[in-house]
Structures are given as C-alpha cells and as structure tokens.
Image (tube, rainbow, N blue to C red):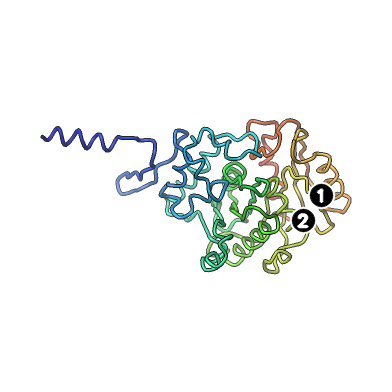
C-alpha cells in the first residue's frame, strides 16, 4: 500500500512539468521558477510573479488567441517587428521574475486605480521597472507596434534590461492601444508619476531620457517637440536625451533635446529618406544629433542583436551618459 501511495504522489508531482510555473524553495529562500522556450504564452500570464498584470507584458489587450503559442514562436505576436529572438525575450522576462523573487516590485500603475475604474480604456496601462543603481537617472521606453499593439517583449524589456545592466534605471510603458494622442497622454502621465514618486522608486529624474521605437518613437517625438504639459502632464522639463528608432515622423524644432536617431536603409515601414531629412533639419536648427543608419536590419530591430545594427544600444546609452555628464 505504501508503494502505491508513493507512486501516485510521484505521478501527480511530475505530470505536465512544462505548463504551469511553480515556486522553488532552496532552504529558507523561495524563488520563482524561470520560464523556458518550451513554455507557452499563457505561462507568462499565469506566472505567480506577474499576478494581476501578466496580460500587460503581452502585445494586445486580449492575447487569449495566442495563449497556446510556444515561446519559441513569440515573434508571431509582433508582426511589425523584425529580428525577434526568443532567447532575448525570455531573458528579459526571467530578469523580472528574478527581481520579484528578490522582493522587488516590477510593475507600477501610473494612473490611480480609481481612475482606471472610471475610465476602462486606461485599465491596461502601467510601468515595468528594470533597476539599475539606486538614485541613478531613469529612462522611459515606449515600444512600438503601430498603435495596434505594444511590442514590449521585443522592443521594451530587452532594451530596459541592457540599460539597467549599465547601472541606469529603465521603465517600459504599457500604453493605450489605438490612438497616438492617447498613447502620448499616457507617456506624459507616466513621466509625471515618476517625477512625483522618484524618491520612493529610488530613481533620479534629473537628466532623464525618453526612448522609443516606431510608434513609440512618435510618442517620444511628440514630447520632445511640445513638452509634457501639451499632453496633460505636469509642467516638467523635456528629457536630457531623446532616443528615436526607425520612425517616419518628421517633426523638429530648435527646442528639441539632444537626439540619437537610428534606422535601417531597407526599412519597409519608416522611409529612410524622411529620417535623413529630419536629421538634417535638426542639425540645421542647432540640435545635437547622433545618427546611426544601418543597411539590412529592417524595421523594428529591437536591441539589434543578430543584425548589422548590433551595438546601437551601447552607442545610444553613451550618448545619453554624455548628456548626464554635462
């Protein structure tokens, strides 16, 4: 009878081992189990580290049609992006799981809960924090997705992880889908929230930077051109640096902050000639600009790893650090 009970318990404990992440205990130290490429999209949503906000890591407001998709095929969730590498996506997700296991908060509501309840369109908004050194300057990253999805998995979390590894703090914004205006209002609200709570968040807002790719770069460009107040935020300074990746937005002014711009010549969405002209116009207006024009990286190359844009992130971080040191 004892052997029957043992075999039954062994069968239960070892059935379907790859589906639902469990907590692991080592002595008195409890950590959350990391995900692997054998897991599925639903395992991100259901992971205990992301309780209450797991859906917001994913591109859509409702991602249930992708729940059964393997993390090896995560690129299928982000059709406007190229060079999506599942192992890089997974590393950034597991970084957050590790932070939660250490007792750190990774998700923050920049709209009060009561405001979200009154305006349901704001329900799927928030900020994900990748921590650098306490008190270090902060970057706020707006991923792209054509305002039809938010590509944080590829164009947000991996960038933030790399920034944090350089000792700087980085937030990734989950904004409202469907409207450039509302998305930029969300960015203004997020900047205001970070300024108002900088001490609690242990970040410095002095010399903060804004980063954006594609649609997210439009949001950054809107703030760089018109300021935070133009989109409903507090009267706050413009960023010390704007990092703008592969967008066809052409706006510029003499009041633009120092700007790092990158694009690939073979970009099928952002016209590279429009980007060239914007760079020329910014420089003519007296704005400090660094421009990296690659050849074959395509549109939405994220960190650029595995493409000819590899290394652009470190150059952009150095450009921002230059503004910090002024």
Query: Which residue lies at the image location 74% right of the left edge and 62% below the top edge?
Result: 227
- Please name whichever residue, 276 or 2, is drawn nearer the observer in this view of the structure: 2
Q: Is residue 15 visible?
A: yes
Query: Which residue lies at the image location 70% right of the left edge and 69% below the top edge?
Result: 235
**Distance between the alpha carbons at the discs numbered 1 and 2:** 15 Å
**Picture coordinates of residue 16 (x, y %)?**
34, 35
Residue extending farthest to the left is: 1
Which of discs 1 and 2 lies nearer the camera? The answer is 1
Q: Is residue 170 visible?
A: no
Residue extending farthest to the front is: 65
Residue 257 numbered tag: 2
Residue extending farthest to the right is: 284
The quarter of the picture where the N terminus appears is: top left
Q: Secondary structure at mark 2?
A: loop
- Please name whichever residue, 251 or 283, is drawn nearer the observer in this view of the structure: 251
- Please name whichever residue, 101 or 297, is drawn nearer the observer in this view of the structure: 297
The quarter of the picture where the C terminus appears is: bottom right
Residue 250 numbered tag: 1
**Disc 2 crowd, CA 10 A, few/some/many (<14, 14-19, 20+):** many
**Disc 1 crowd, CA 10 A, few/some/many (<14, 14-19, 20+):** some
Q: Is residue 96 left or right of residue 257?
A: left
- The quadrant holding residue 202 is bottom right
Residue 234 numbered tag: none
**Picture coordinates of residue 257 (x, y %)?**
77, 56
Badge 1 or badge 2: first in the primary sequence: 1
- Please name whichever residue, 77 or 300, is drawn nearer the observer in this view of the structure: 77
Q: Secondary structure at mark 1?
A: loop
Q: Is residue 185 left or right of residue 35?
A: right
């Amino acid at each position: 009878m004892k052997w029957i009970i043992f075999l039954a318990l062994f069968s239960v404990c070892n059935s379907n081992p790859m589906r639902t992440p469990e907590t692991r205990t080592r002595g008195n130290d409890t950590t959350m189990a990391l995900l692997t490429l054998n897991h599925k999209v639903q395992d991100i949503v259901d992971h205990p580290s992301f309780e209450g906000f797991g859906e917001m890591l994913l591109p859509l407001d409702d991602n249930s049609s992708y729940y059964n998709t393997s993390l090896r095929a995560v690129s299928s969730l982000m059709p406007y992006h190229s060079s999506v590498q599942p192992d890089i996506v997974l590393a950034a997700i597991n970084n957050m799981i590790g932070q939660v296991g250490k007792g750190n908060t990774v998700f923050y509501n920049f709209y009060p809960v009561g405001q979200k309840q009154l305006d349901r369109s704001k329900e799927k908004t928030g900020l994900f924090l990748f921590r650098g050194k306490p008190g270090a300057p902060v970057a706020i990253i707006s991923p792209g997705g054509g305002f039809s999805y938010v590509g944080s998995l590829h164009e947000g979390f991996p960038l933030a992880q790399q920034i944090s590894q350089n000792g700087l703090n980085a937030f990734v914004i989950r904004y409202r889908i469907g409207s450039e205006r509302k998305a930029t209002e969300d960015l203004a609200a997020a900047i205001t929230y970070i300024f108002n709570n900088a001490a609690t968040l242990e970040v410095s807002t002095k010399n903060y930077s804004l980063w954006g790719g594609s649609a997210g770069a439009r949001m950054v460009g809107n703030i760089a051109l018109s300021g935070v107040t133009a989109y409903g935020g507090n009267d706050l300074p413009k960023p010390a640096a704007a990092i703008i990746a592969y967008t066809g937005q052409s706006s510029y002014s003499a009041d633009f902050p120092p700007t790092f711009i990158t694009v690939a010549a073979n970009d099928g969405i952002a016209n590279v000639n429009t980007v060239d002209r914007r760079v020329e116009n910014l420089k003519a207006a007296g704005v400090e600009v660094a421009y990296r024009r690659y050849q074959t990286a395509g549109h939405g190359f994220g960190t650029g790893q595995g493409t000819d844009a590899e290394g652009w992130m470190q150059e952009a971080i150095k450009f921002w650090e230059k503004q910090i040191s002024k």
